[in-house]
Image (cartoon, rainbow, N blue to C red):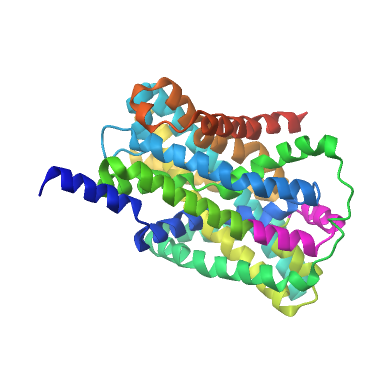
Amino acid sequence: MNPTNSAASAVQSSSKFTYKDFTWCLSLFGTAVGAGVLFLPIKAGAGGFWPLVILALIAAPMTWFAHKSLARFVLSAKNPNADITDTVEEHFGKTGANLITFAYFFAIYPIVLIYGVGITNTVDSFLVNQIGMESIPRWLLSGALITSMTAGVVFGKELMLRATSAMVYPLVFILLALSFYLIPDWNSSMVEITPDWSAMPVVVWLAIPIIVFSFNHSPIISQFAKEQRLKHGDNAVRKTDTITGGAAMMLMGFVMFFVFSVVLSLSPEQLAMAKEQNISVLSYLANAHESPLISYLGPLVAFAAITSSYFGHFLGAHEGLVGLIKSRSKAPRNVVEKGSLLFIVITTWIVAIINPSILDMIETMGAPMIAAILFLLPVIAMQTVPAMKKYKTSLSVQIFTAICGFAAITSVIYGAF
């Protein structure tokens, strides 16, 4: 085949949006849609209707610019099979790779803790409010739930991964159906609140971490970028830009519709009560709504979302901790693996018993590390790594991405004081 014709064919192929591209959009979308979405309306709606509108407008560009930049970062590696850790080691050395491994662990591990609290509160609320039982002692309920979920991961990993992958799309469909179902309950209580425009920037700023957390699909970006590079070669950038853009638009349309539908169907006082009770918005709707459908379907959907998210994040946290310990210890691998598993289970159980605020944990523990890796790392590489020269995004995109990353991190510091 003529090399010129081959190159032209590759360019033409990369410019077409295929069914395979659509399935990748769904995969990125499915990775992002998890339990974080169930807490997003509580935080995003807390500031009122108009800050929520602003958040909806910036959510798509925030998500797209950050994820396409991270994909380009992975594409910049010399080895076409390199993942993000390999790419960091190539560009920043072993110290940089160790820092990223450390940051990845502390981006994922807090999410496991969050889901330990979330699953306990969801089941407790369901048993008390829908079944009519007395509360089971928290130490016993949390221990049984966390042990059961962990056993599912340890003894049936492949089955659990297939099950959680299969759960994503029914979950998305049910959330979409609930969004439409709530439309008759929409009211003007949120819209009628007179906004304090002078405080609006601070309100939006403090809500950015929950947007970062809820729209994050960075764990799948390495695999996604590698496949596009193997298939499209030098034209992979165009393809990754297109697919990440499609996923961002799907997330903005679907997730923000769900958020608006929930927020408009509740009052500010009800959202505040959901936060105080430390339960997902679906569990609160189940308790506050007279519909039997929502009363039983809401907690079940919340349970499915939290469980499916727990499986994936537990695996990531366990692998990350094993990697951190192995790089600094000569202990046998099986000892390290068992010790790491026990550490994660016991600490998750302790945190579930203590029952800290889930939204506070997302904002202070989960979002900052995600923001550092997803928003800041690619921009820093674009300015300092020669291999990133041809993968640079425009200066305006870099500035916007960096501002969003700094906003997610600094809002946590501001909130602490």
Asked if one can make out residue 98 in the rendered structure from this viewpoint, the answer is yes
x 88%, y 55%: residue: 192
Q: Is residue 192 left or right of residue 346?
A: right
Q: What range is drawn magenta here?
A: 256-278
Looking at the image, which is closer to me, 201 or 409? 201
Outermost residue on the left side: it is 1
What secondary structure is the magenta-colored segment mainly?
Answer: helix
Q: Is residue 289 magenta?
A: no
x 89%, y 48%: residue: 194
Asked if one can make out residue 140 in the rendered structure from this viewpoint, the answer is no
**Quadrant into which the C terminus falls:** top right
Q: Is residue 318 left or right of residue 58?
A: left
x 48%, y 25%: residue: 380
Q: Is residue 58 above or below residue 388?
A: below
Q: Is residue 204 left or right of residue 98?
A: right
Q: Is residue 205 left or right of residue 2?
A: right
Outermost residue on the bottom side: it is 292
Q: Is residue 37 above or below residue 297?
A: above
Q: Is residue 108 above or below residue 258?
A: above
The image shows a total of numbered marks equal to: 0
Residue 199, picture quadrant: top right
Residue 15: x, y in percent? 34, 51
Residue 294, picture quadrant: bottom right
Residue 223: x, y in percent? 36, 47
Q: Is residue 266 magenta?
A: yes
Looking at the image, which is closer to me, 229 or 347? 229
Residue 313: x, y in percent? 50, 49
Residue 396: x, y in percent? 54, 31
